[in-house]
Image (cartoon, rainbow, N blue to C red):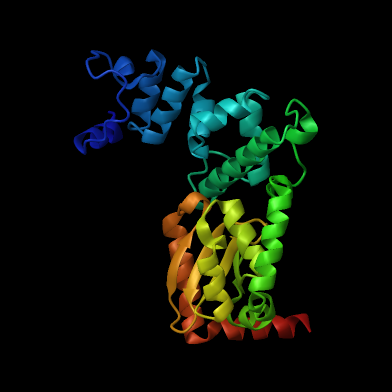
Amino acid sequence: GLDHVAEKLVKCYYGMIADQNARRPDHFLGIRKERVKQLIRKKGDIQLLEVMQMEKRQGQNWTDEQIEHLAETHLSGVQVEMATRYMTLQKLLNRIEKYAGCGYGTECGNASERIRHTATTYTDYLSMRLSLGYDLNNTVYQQPRDLGEAHTRMVLETNKEEMDKHLKQAAEKYPEIRRTYRSLRNKYFYEDDSYLIRPARSAEEIVMEGRMLHHCVGGETYLSKHNTGKTYILMLRYKTEPDVPYITVEIDARNPRIIQWYGNKDGKPDKENMQAWLDTWLMKLKTGMLAETIQTVAIEIA
C-alpha cells in the first residue's frame, strides 16, 4: 500500500532509504514501527514520510494528527527543531493555523498553500529574532499580533545600517521606478476576492521584495530594466495581506507576456492555481479588460 514510496524508488529516488538491507519497512524507511499503518493509509505520501523520519531523528513521539498537520506545513527538520526549543509542537502548529486563518486538512489547494506560506514566514521570523539576540522564551516575541509586519520589521533590523545604505542608493540610482508607479498601476493593477497584483512602488520596495522572499529580484539587473522600461516588476499578494510579499512577477513591458514568476526562495507556491490566476490576469491585460475594471472601481468610489 505504500504506492508513492514505490513510485519514487522505481524512479531511483533513494534519499528516503534509511537502511537498504532492512527486512522491515520501518527500519527500511527510518520511521517508528507504529507509523507504518498510518503511512499505508496515506498511500505512502512522501511529505508525510519525511515528517515521520524527522520524528524518529529528533527522538520524538508525536500524535497521528500532529504528524499529518506538520506534513502540511512543509517545514524542514531544522526549522521544527529551532521552533520547538521554545514551544511545544502543538503550540507551533496552532500558531501557524491562527496566523494563516485557515485550518489543516481541508484538502483545498489555496488553504494548503496558505498554511505552507505562513509556516515559512513564522519560522523565518523566529529565526531572525533568535539571530538578533532576542529571548524567544518571551511569549511577546513568540506571538506577534501581526506576523507580516513583525517579519518585515525583523528583516529591516537585520544588518539595518547596511540595508538603509543600500535602500538609499537604490532610490537615488533608479528614481523612475517611483515616478512611473501611478501610470503603471493604472495599466497593470487587478484584484479579485483572493489576490491582487500591482507594480512596484519604488526601487526600495523591489530591494525589500528580494530580501524578504530570498530571491534575486532586488539586484541591479531587475532594478535597471524596470527603471528604463524594458521589463516591470509586479507584486502578487493575498488581498487580505497586501503588504506581505508572496509572489514576484517580471513582465515584458512591450509585448505583454510573463517572463518569470517566483515566490519564496525561487519556489512556485501553489503552482497550478497561481499559474491559472496569472494567465487570467494576462488575458485581461491583453484584451483591455483591466482598464475597464479600474474605471468601474473608480466610478464606484466616486
Q: How many marks?
A: 0
Q: Is residue 256 above or below residue 45?
A: below
Q: Is residue 8 above or below residue 183?
A: above
- Tell me residue 129's x, y (percent): 70, 36
- Tell me residue 177's x, y (percent): 64, 75
Instruction: Give the quadrant of the N terminus.
Output: top left
Residue at figure coordinates x 68%, y 48% from the top left: 155
Q: Is residue 220 left or right of residue 150?
A: left
Residue 251 appears in the figure: yes
- Tell me residue 243's x, y (percent): 69, 59
Q: Quadrant of residue 37?
A: top left
Residue at figure coordinates x 55%, y 39% from the top left: 104
Q: Is residue 205 left or right of residue 236?
A: right
Q: Is residue 132 above or below residue 274?
A: above
- Which residue extends farthest left? 10
Residue at figure coordinates x 43%, y 70% from the top left: 259
Residue 95 appears in the figure: no
Residue at figure coordinates x 79%, y 84% from the top left: 302
- Tell me residue 195's x, y (percent): 59, 63
Q: Is residue 84 left or right of residue 10?
A: right
